[in-house]
Image (spheres, rainbow, N blue to C red):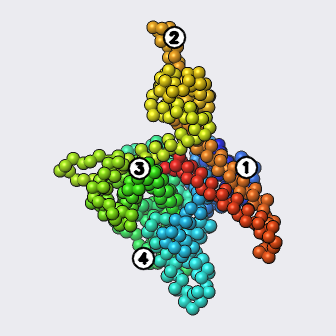
Amino acid sequence: MVSPHGIKLAVHLISAYFGDIVSKVCECLLRNGTLSLQQVLRFTELNKENATNALLVLIQHNCVQAFSIEQQGGFMEQPKMVTHYMALHDNIIHLMRFSKFLAIISDEFGQECMEIFEGLLQHGRLSMNQIVDRYKDKHKSHTSKENSTAANVAHENFNKLAQAHYIERCPASEPYLESEKEDDTAGKKKTAKSKTNDPSQTLEARALAAATPMESIRFLVEADTFTNGAPDENTKKTSTTEIVGEKRKKIFLEPENKEILWRVNFEEFVRHFRHKCCITHMTTRMDNVAGIVLSAIFEATRRDETKVKMENTVPLPMDRIYEEAIKREEGRSLSLERVRDSLVQLGCEVPIIGLDETYSIDLKKIIDEAQAQEVESVVLKKYGREAYRIFRLLLQSKRLCETDQIWMATFVDKKDALKILFQLWKDDLLHMERVANEGQKLESLCWKLNKVSVWEQVLDDMYHAALNLKLRLVHELEQAKEILRKGKSVGDQVLAKRKKVGEKWEVLDSSLMILDDAIMLFHDF
């Protein structure tokens, strides 16, 4: 469930990118959940054309997923197919990370790949032909004699992005979900594809699973070689090795004679930032060698990770870790024993002699430590050092603690400790229980950290702060609009104002990016 300020931030981003009508439809979906078009019209009071166009814009930019499901008719009426729409909050928040994504592509692949990638960020979904045409138009002056050169360069750079999994085929625009009644009649004859009909999953989770392309074709570029919008003869052939369920899904996801659309793969960027967060945390907590070794493990196992939130790294032999570590300039001076010691520091157990020397690192523990460190800093700033000591004790204890135990362990005066505990409890950071002591006929107070509530509050406060920063950036731009419009042939006073506006913008934007790193730590990692 999305927090209140998480919704407000998402609505602001949509409004800034696409206008008020689109943001009104988006807010309706975020606050009310999955809705049909008729329900959207009723909640927003928009006319059908405006609401439909707004939904199409949101789908084009990967902010909404549509799916159809059979709905039972009334008396003497046949069942009918109804299209539902669900907002994708995570994808909406990614709108403010586009500059981060572009920086990664620029560092790894250079300017030409970045131009192709930028087109996908701007337009949401594009076909290969649209990407190539856009690239050729941008480089007309350099390729006036041979347009094929620009096309070849575009294809080559596109392949690089697909092979690195930074772009992917778009999900099905409107997958069909079987109703619960149909699921029951299917009985026990279910194959691997039946995971989209798992009753334990929410309707939204089932829709996303049904829309997602098969992993075998998700990043496949060869099957997308079109000429003037018509598929190549080879792409019309279906592999005989595919299982029936996968073949049916492939046919559904790729209608014949339609170009395949591509989009940015946000998952890969989240994985990149998660790895970076783990490396930074362990480098700060331990030393540079720990960061080098962890980075080497991530690089070696990047393609073997099955999901973003991996709790442990893929087991890797010692020789493979060392081989990857010494590829880096900063790791060439490391000995095998030094790498092994660093792995022990990272929490790995030394394998028993006689078995394969493989290592796996607990990533969940690293992320938990980084989150706890961030929350502790928030408590310190908001409540003071004594509250910080009490909070830290309760975070580490993970059980009910009596008041006397708390103030004695933290060296805080008993009256002050009680005052702090009640304040934290009032703010829903702590859980309190009254425990009766029959022998002394007294009642003691016991306290425990309400971790779920704390983490949710911290994330919502971060969304709130990010929204305030975005609004401040808009305000600064409005205030400086006249100054920014003026050219360079102006007086020193105007130039000084322009410089001041630029510096203020950089500070605010930098603060927003740092805050966004913390948001990702609590929400995406």
Q: Which residue carries the number 2 mark? A: 442
Secondary structure at badge 3 equals: loop
Residue 53 in the image: state x and y as whole percent: 69, 60
| Along the line of sight, the residue nearer the viewer: 147 or 79 | 147
Q: Is residue 304 left or right of residue 274?
A: left
Residue assigned mark 3? 286
Q: Is residue 108 left or right of residue 50?
A: left
Q: Residue at x 54, y 76 (%)?
A: 112
Give how far apart the Cα atoms at labels 3 and 4 are. Answer: 54 Å
Which numbered tag is attached to residue 243?
Answer: none
Secondary structure, mark 4, is helix
Q: Are marks 1 and 2 in contact (CB under 8 Å)?
A: no
Q: Nearer the viewer, mark 4 or mark 2?
A: 2
Q: Secondary structure at mark 1?
A: helix
Residue 524, x across and y down, in percent: 51, 50
Residue 279 screen position, x and y as percent: 44, 54
Q: Which residue is mark 4?
A: 234
Front-most of residues 257 and 134: 134
Q: CA distance from mark 1 to mark 2?
A: 57 Å
Question: Mark 1 or mark 2, which is nearer to you?
Answer: 2
Of labels 1 and 3, the one closer to you: 3
Badge 1 is on which residue?
44
Distance (Cα) linking label 4 and label 2: 82 Å
* Residue lying at 51% horizontally and 11% vertically, measured from the top left: 442
* 280, above or below 485, in the image: above
Regarding residue 172, the answer to whether it shows in the image is yes
Residue extending farthest to the bottom is: 145
Q: Amino acid at mark 1?
A: Thr
For the residues labelled 1 and 3, the Cα–Cα distance comes to: 53 Å
Q: Position of residue 374 (x, y in %)?
A: 53, 44
Is residue 249 rendered to the left or right of residue 6?
left
